[in-house]
Structures are given as C-alpha cells and as structure tokens.
Amino acid sequence: MSLIDSVAVNTHYTRSVNLERDANSVEVVKAYIPTSRALRTFAKVADTFHAGQAPRAWSLVGPYGSGKSSFSVFLSQLLSHPDDVATKVAQKVLRATDKELVKPYQKATKNNQGYFKVLITGAPEPMSQRLVRGMAEAAEIHWGGRKGKKPAIIKKLRSAAESKQVVTTDVVDLLKELQAQLEKTNCAGILLVIDELGKFLEYEARHYGANDIYLLQALAEHACAGNKVNLYIFALLHQSFEQYAKGLGESLKNEWSKVQGRFEEVPFLESAEQVLRVVSAAFEHSFTKTQQKTVREHVDTTITVLEGLEALPGSLTHDEATALFESCYPLHPVSAVLLPLLCQKVAQNERTLFSYLGSHEEFGLQDMLSKLEGVGSYVYPHHIYDYFITNQPAVMGDYLTHRRWAEVVTAIERLGDAKQEELNLLKTIGILNIIGSKGGFKASKELLETCMPSKPVCTRAAKKLRDQSVITYRRYNSEFRVWQGSDFDLESALQEELSNLGNFSLADELNSAKSLLPVVARRYTIESGGLRYFTPTF
C-alpha cells in the first residue's frame, strides 16, 4: 500500500499567494502560520495604534517566495471590519499563537468599520497613477453599498486616475481628503500595501522625472505624522532601495538612500526552523498507533545522531525536534533540514519548497507518495536531488551554486554504471556540498549513515566512491566532498581575496598607471582647420 493513503498535503500551502487576488480569501488566512518575524512585525504595528507621531511605514525585503504577500493578506484581514468572516478567522489564528498580541488588533477595530485597504501590485508605470487608481477602486467599493449622497472624493479620485500625470502634492492632498471623509464613516485607518514595489522603482530609474521616489518619501512622512484615520504603509521588495538605484548618479543614489531611511526595513527571510514549522503544518497524517510508533522511533533515532553532531536547526531540543520532524513525515529529517536551505540557495525559497510539496512531477512529493511503499519509507536527500535536477534545471542560483551543481552532475556521469547505493550516496554528498556546511549539518560519516539503509552499506559505498576518485574525505573538518581534484577551495579563496580589496576600482588603477594617448578628431580638423582631440579614460 502506497503512502498516498496515509499522508496528504494541504493544498492551500502549495500555491503562491497573490496580494490582490487573495485579499479576501478566508482559506489563505486560515492556512497562515505566524512566524516569529511576522509576530514581531505585528507587534510593531500594534504599538502605533494611536493618533500621535510614530513610524508607520515598513519595507518588507526578501527574495521571491519568502512569505511577504501571505503576511500582507493576513494583516489586511486582521484590520478589516470586525464582523467579516476572514477577520474573525485571522484573529483566531493570531490568538492561538499569541493571546496578548491579538488584543490590540481587536481593540483597534472594535466599534468601527475596520481599515480602508488599498492593495496594489507594481508594474512598469508611474506609481502615482497606479496608487490613485487603487484608491479610487477602494473608495468605490467602500461607499458603493452605502445609502445617501456619495462624497466628492470619489469623483476626484476617479478624475485623477484618468489623468495622464499625477504629481506628488496632488496624491497627498487626495489622501488627506480621503482620510477626512473616512473619519465620517467611522473608519479606523488606511492600510496601503504595495507589492512588487521594485517594478515601480525600476521604472523610476529608467524614466527620471516620474518622481515616485519622492512620492514614497511624502507618503512615509504623512503616515508618521499621525491622524484620527492613520495611514499604514507596507512596501514589498526583493532587495533594498539602493539596489534599484544602480546606474544613477551619486546625488540621486543619496536621495534614494534618504527615502529608504523613511521606511523601517524588515528582512523577510525566515530561519530553517521557522520554515520547518510551516512545512509540518502542511502535512496531514492518518496513521494507526502502530504506524505512528514506527515513525516516532525512527525519527527519534535520527534526531539523536543529528543532536550529537550539532546539526539541528535553531535552538530545538531533542523532544521538540522529534515532534517537529515526525510531523514532517515522509520527509527524512535530513531531507527536511535540507529543503529550506536548498530552496534559498537555488530557487524561490518557500514558493519552490511548497511547489515541491504539491508537485506531481517526477520525484515531486506527490509522485513519491505514490511510489513509497508503507509507513517507514522516506523521501531521502537523493530523491530531492533527483527532483531538482529533473524539474528545476534552469533555476540553479548564483554562479558558485551553479558550478557546484555542475561538479556533482559531472561526478555522477564519471561514475558511470554503478550500484544504486553508490549513486544515492554520491547524490546525498553532492546536495549537502551544494548548500555548504551549516555547523554540524554537513556530509559527515555519521550524518550520511542516517540516509542509507545501514552503516555497512554506507561504508562500502563510500569506499567504492573514494577508490574511483569520485569523492574525497577532508579530515580537517570530517566531511566528504565531491572530488574537485584538490582539497584547496579555489572559489572561496578567490572570494576572500576580492573582499580584501575594499573599494578597488580597476578603471582608476588603469588610469593612474598609464595615460592613454590622445585621439585626434581627424575629420573635424581637416574640415575646419581647428585641432580637436580627446583623452581616453577607462
């Protein structure tokens, strides 16, 4: 009997969240798991639930698939009308994690209409125009079901949205008038979330004069000032502001840096432990007591080894780790630790991770559930290697990571027609090499033995691979490595030397070393009789 009858994955965890599409999704809110970083951010927001001055602009910075959109959708529901089903669900989810933290959110939306939400997604266009359109759409929804005369702000927003150009002062003035009208409808505040802000910034960098960067500054300052209908801003980015300013002059870079200072930056990249807690919640098991005991005993044995190697993520105790990895079954504990690290290295973080959990592609988790026979079978690291090399060949991270993948692939090709146990061990060593040593989590003999059928099988396969010069054993750090021809790590040494150069400019060095000969504008000189020349520089 395959594992597919005993293990299921909640499909709500296996698809990416879209800010605008899922804004009112109860299922997305119900499936959300507040991480420690998210809880700290919720607490910061709660500290500003007053009309006085306070920073109310945040930039959530993290790579694709790191949970920024999920966080924003959950927050928007926490601040919605208290009678909405999604709001009640959001409060219930937060209460289950932190009973005290949910109280200020309940108080902030009690006896009012909740927050007015403007959720927009970046595009290659001026942000001011997209923002005004978003405000107009939200205003029409807010007042659409209300009786009586509609306020003039709706018409003003619609008119501004249809105009070809909207300047910063116009946007701020419209926002102030909107706040005044919302106060009359007993609205608690305005939540502005800008997903994919980087697309607006890239447009600004290419079309200087759009002035979106100054609009961001004006919005952040206005939010900080405080109001009876406070403005809260969340900007979602894949990298910090200054990274989008590359290619601009120094003065403009400094201006962008000043604007970034108006936003409190929240690095949105969760630890492996936090991601594993979300992964464990995605699994649903239907085991008998005997099956549960079988899984627990095997996991406990593996955890004992990992604990001895100091290879457990975060500050997990033995019992916490056993319970966590038991919930992640059928992922082998080493596979469970490996997956978040690998997805950070080569793909789109949690997005790729949860895509894997819902994947029916070859070696994807759903495919493996149909192949694995009986409780006690596991998804090992070599299965994960097979999935990534089969289904993610074009997404292999940076140059160094890509090179490590190539080394492993080449080693497997060199191995040729070998026993399956040797191939599996080589793939396991290779994928651990790709993510690099993480304390005790590396391709050590003891860790590898937990991923193989038995210690003798592991020892025999390792000896065979060493005899064929496919792997080597580094005694100084007790680790197996895919053989690169030397124990000297050229790439690491090169990166170290480059970092020691400091603010080195090759162009400046070449210019100071030797000046190039002037180039005469021959045609101009012949036609006009005046000598003109140019001095080339690097």
Image (cartoon, grey):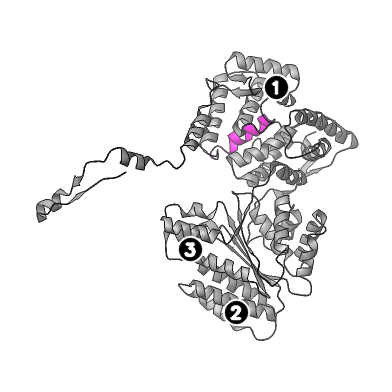
Judging from the image, what secondary structure is the residue with disc 2 in?
Answer: helix
In the image, is residue 190 above or below residue 477? below
Q: Residue at x 58, y 68 (%)?
A: 221
- In the picture of the structure, the residue carrying the numbered disc 2 is 177
Q: Amino acid at mark 3?
A: Glu
Q: Residue at x 48, y 72 (%)?
A: 167
- In the picture of the structure, the residue carrying the numbered disc 1 is 445
- Is residue 277 magenta-colored? no
In the image, is residue 526 above or below residue 285? below
* Image position of 251 (left or right of 388): left
| Residue 358 appears in the rendering | yes
Magenta stretch bounds: 376-394
Q: CA distance from mark 3 to mark 2?
A: 25 Å
Q: Residue at x 28, y 38 (%)?
A: 514
Q: Residue 349 got which mark?
A: none
Q: In the rendered picture of this protein, how many numbered marks are placed on residues?
A: 3
- In the picture of the structure, the residue carrying the numbered disc 3 is 125
**Where residue 487 appears, x then y in whole percent?**
55, 21
